[in-house]
Image (cartoon, rainbow, N blue to C red):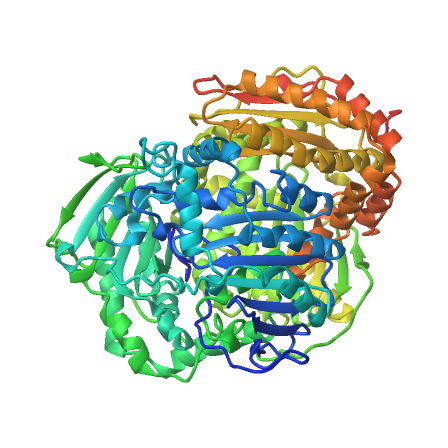
Amino acid sequence: MTLSPPLVSRSLMLLATLWLAALVPGLARAEAPGEPSGSVETTRPHTSPQDIRDYRLLTLSNGLTALLVHDPEADKAAASMNVSVGSADDPEDLAGLAHFLEHMLFLGTAPFPDADAYQGYINRHGGSHNAFTAPHDTNYFFDIEPEALPGALDRFSQFFIAPLFNADRLESERNIVHSEYQARIRDEARREQDVLNQFLNPAHPGTGFSVGSRETLADPAEGEPSLRARVIDFYERHYDANVMHLALIAPQDLDTQEALVRERFDAIVDRDLEAPRVATPLVLDETLPLALAARSLRDRQQVSFLFPIPDPNRDYPFKPVDFLANLLGHEGEGSLLAALREAGLADALAAGLTRDDGENALFAVTVSLTPDGAERLDTIQASLFATIARLREAGPQAWRYEEQARLAEQRFRFIQHGEPIHGVTRLAMSLADYPAEDVLYAPYRMGEFAAERLTPYLQALTPERLIRLYSGPEVEGESTSPWFQAPYRAEARIDWPAAEPLDGLSLPEPNPFIAQDLSLLGAQDERPELRLETPGARLWHQAHGGFRTPQVEWRLSLQHPGASASPHQAVLSQLLAGWLNDSLNEAFYPARLAGQHFSAYAHARGLTLSFSGWRDRQARVMEEALAQLTEGEITAASLARVKQRLAREWRNAPLSALYQQANRTLGEALIRPQWPTADLLEALEPLDSEALRTYRRDFLAALHIEAMAIGDLDATLARQQALEVFEALAPRLPADAIADLTPLEAVDLPPLRPDSQRQESLLLRYLQGPDRTLASQAELAVLGQLLSTPFYTRLRTEEQLGYIVNAGYRPLLDAPGIALLVQSPETGSQAIGEHIDAFLETFDATLAELDDATLAPYRQAVRDQLLARDTSLGQLTDRLWRGLALGDEAFDRRERLAAEVMAVDAGRLRQAWQTLRREPPVDVAFDPGDEPSDVLALSRDLPPLPHHADE
């Protein structure tokens, strides 16, 4: 896999869904129409030929760079401000100060002094917001209804002009930062990073503690500047228009956007600052080579091979690290991972960049190990270097580079921009490092092949410059890392033991899955139509050319009456899906590189096969997947890998985030069928290859199929491909042979306690709606919108109960409900419940005084969220697919629900709230040491939640 490994890096810390890169100084100068000469710098970035958006990049008089994007199809406006300063710039005596400052900016500005002025405005107008601090960047972002954009920018811009650094909030926000630290203290990646930092150059600014805690942000000794004074000093030393980059995406035209930006952001102070540059080496040569071993908390073993290299950003047009990562992270026949899997030593591998700081970086190859692999690290290392030797022997080859460049160009040509809030974050960061013309193109740009640009990075991958970091639960440490308490041991200047590499290693062959026909058919249907129906199967199809890409999304739900009838059956469904993915991994990896994606996943009704990619070559992938499902050999080795992955996942469930465990517990109680992980783990152990072969035979013998195809595909071809699927699988059961998923009515449930090993406390209070009507769903959705911000402000900002605090609408299938959740490192669940009780009483009074004028923007926000535009073909398909699973065969449920929302008035809302408050809630509660509840026993006799109130 060509991805960054799970280590904290500039790229990895920034948002997992985003391509994180940034733009170098040096903008082309031009005069904007109507502006005085020299007052503005503008340029237009290189765009995809299918991109209908307009762009304008300008530099304001104070030095701030802004990229404005007019998206005529957007139904949300979004903005992001990236500041080129981060945790690597913390003072030595105040670890976490950059992160603490990020928190403080949300707590009031001179024109908008209330702590919830910004958050409340965003919430009232259907938006969302957040921020993050990375080693070299701090990023603030939001999205909102377009007509509310001016007011949002009014509030947002003041973060960078007149923040209050409210002294009354200093202590509370320090507690929140400490709670965030406590919530992350068991995170495996941070624990490994904490160990690694002890052996990198201690003078490097990126090796410190970045989150902050009560101790690192403690009040200074008497006579020294106060913490507030230090925050203000840091802000004034580092926050400056010259190191800020703003991105805006909105349906408003560029002239309107420019006026909005100039009026609000020209006032940011120009201190003539420059972005900090790292001049210190990340790794000291005299410490290499180095072997590290760290204890993991989870049942998982992995090893990372880390090599110091120059930051490749300077060579971004040639993608040297991407080129190497593609070859070393390859998973096809003859690859390093294929050999490791065949030998039973590993089940996954990722290669890519980490810890990049503009000057230094680490190239990482991270391997997820089997227990046998953990005992043979030297063999794995020898095999890695044997693969590297093959690359050196062959040298950088033009045809390999050109193949990667061709695939990158295809992706760029038909780029789908996604959510505006993700786009602005990516673009604001891209404005920091890349030339203006490449702000969009840089992640995809691969110039003419130049071996001399690639060779130095390959030559850096040597045993003499290796840091090997192993982590596993069995490690006995000689020391403990300072911030995340990971026991570890180390051996510097190690002489690596000799070992023989595995056989069968080779470099990839030319990719046979690269699409040739990328023509656009351009057909467009209003909604999916039933194109094909047989006694055992149905095809829903919508020709959709709105995303201007020759891609198609297929979903095939293979439904069996007994797929989840017991934990035994549910585990076999999981094994069948897992085996299919695993057994096709080598064959389909080139297809993934070429833009053809396949996955199988199990669910309560059976399996879903998901295909996503170019129309050209997709039929081949579908044919091979179906042939493997029906006829492929189920080997003991493949099954062992799948069993190990599932067992590891289920054994680690008690260590997952506590709020995730609480939500799972709620689902186990109120949705049928669903099984606890302990029951699944017990059912998994005795299953073998013969059991799975028998289950596959029985599963395929009694199927109903629901199929959906959405994209640049006409009805004739969709029917033809569906017929081939139906002929291969021979489904014979009617739709009514498959039971519906059922939400249950919460009647007299005691507090439910998850099976957890976490050290925090939690309370999730769930208020269930009276029935499953659209009217009840609409009422609770509006109530959730109303209480979200005041709940957060009171329990998190004011009462400081914890870092993870949220409330809002939470349906279970089509059963409406409101969830209020607090996870706290210090406050017990009973005390949290008392705080929630007090809030609900206050909210009772708020609703009693609510009028329709006050309600209107919240109601509109819910309506707009329901009708939000799909921003990619995959997102559209997933929405339609979920609707079909809930019986929405007219594909108009969201429109009907939105109309119902707009009919909700204040009186009706008060009545709905009173109904909710009369019924006892469902509490999911946990304190360290609690014994888990037998959730299935407690909920076994619950009746289904009625569709209508009179049932």
Where is residue 825 shown, x and y percent of the image?
45, 26
Q: Is residue 627 visible?
A: no
Quarter that holds the C terminus: top right
Where is residue 283 shown, x and y percent of the image?
22, 57
Where is residue 555 shown, x and y percent of the image?
66, 55
Quarter that holds the N terminus: bottom left
Q: Looking at the rendering, which quadrant does residue 385 occupy?
A: bottom left
Q: Looking at the rendering, which quadrant does residue 177 occupy?
A: top left
Q: Which residue is more in the foreground, 479 or 403?
A: 479
Q: Which residue is more in the foreground, 756 or 484?
A: 484
Q: Looking at the rendering, which quadrant does residue 116 occupy?
A: top right
421 displayed left or right of 813: left
**716 versus 241 height, above or below:** below
489 displayed left or right of 72: left
Q: Which residue is more in the foreground, 622 or 480?
A: 480
Judged from this view, the residue extending furthest toward the front is 223
412 displayed left or right of 367: right
The residue sitting at 72% across, 38% down in the picture is 785
Counting labels gives 0
Q: Can residue 116 be seen in this view?
A: yes
